[in-house]
Image (cartoon, helix red, strand yellow):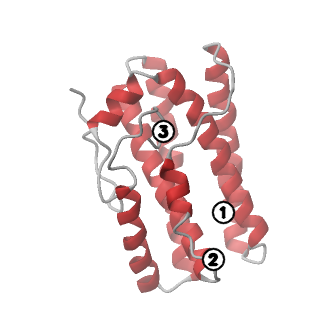
Amino acid sequence: MLSSALPTINILKQPTSSAWVEQAISNLDIILLDHAQCERKAAGVALNLIFRYPSNAKMVRELTKIAREELEHFEQVNQWLEDRNIPMRPLTPPPYGAGLKAQIRPKEPDRFLDSLLVSGLIEARSHERLGLLATHCPEPKLAKFYHGLMASEARHYGTYWVLADTYFLREIVAKRLEELAIIESELLVNLHPEPRIHS
């Protein structure tokens, strides 16, 4: 039985289960393929926010850095896929991303706040799960690669929190983040049958 024990990220209401760790370690090629798509999507989220809110100068500056870094990670994961002769192909996404996106309220400024907080929660969960892969991966080089990504993932979710705190009152941010964090953990209660970073 693999342990999922790692230092807890405070905002995540429930840690990742050992069942996910076992599923992921048993399907590393699929996890790598999904990871590449997660990095591409993360870059797209940052760019979409830049296009939607171009007058928010601090946000544009910070998310430009994130988009650039996510695309660099996308390239790095693609190199792993190439080295392992894994062709790029689409994967059916788990319900996690769509479930969180459905919580984004349609009217401004709620939409802006929720977009920042949902992005931050996804980055926080990604940081936790890359840490678990780094800890449990039986391939030393791949484990080292995942460990090397953790710092940037932590920076990313920290950036989204800081941006929310920049543009909204802290008590409003805290209340909404609490609500969304509960939903985020509920979406992961049942392990998705197909191995994914956010299954």
Please name the amino acid that badge 2 sits on.
Answer: Pro
The quadrant of the picture occupied by the C terminus is: top left
Compare residues 85 and 10 and report the one nearer the observer: 85
The disc, 2 or 3, on the residue closer to the chain's N-terminal end is: 2
Residue 7 x %, y %: 28, 48
Q: Secondary structure at mark 3?
A: loop
> Quick check: marks 2 and 1 in contact, CB under 8 Å?
no
Indicate the amino acid at tag 3.
Ile
Residue at mark 2 to residue at mark 3: CA–CA distance: 27 Å
Distance between mark 3 and mark 1 Cα atoms: 25 Å
Circles 3 and 1: CB atoms closer than 8 Å: no
In percent of width and height, residue 52 lies at 75, 70
Front position in the image: 47 or 99: 99
- Is residue 86 positioned above or below 114 on the image? above
**Relative side of 60 to 140, left or right:** right
Q: Position of residue 32 (x, y in %)?
A: 55, 28
Residue at the disc numbered 2: 106
Q: Is residue 65 visible?
A: no
Residue pointed to by mark 1: 62
Which disc, if any, is residue 197? 3
Measuring from the top left, give residue 196's x and y in whole percent. Answer: 48, 36
Q: Amino acid at mark 1?
A: Glu
Q: Earlier in the sequence, mark 3 or mark 1?
A: 1
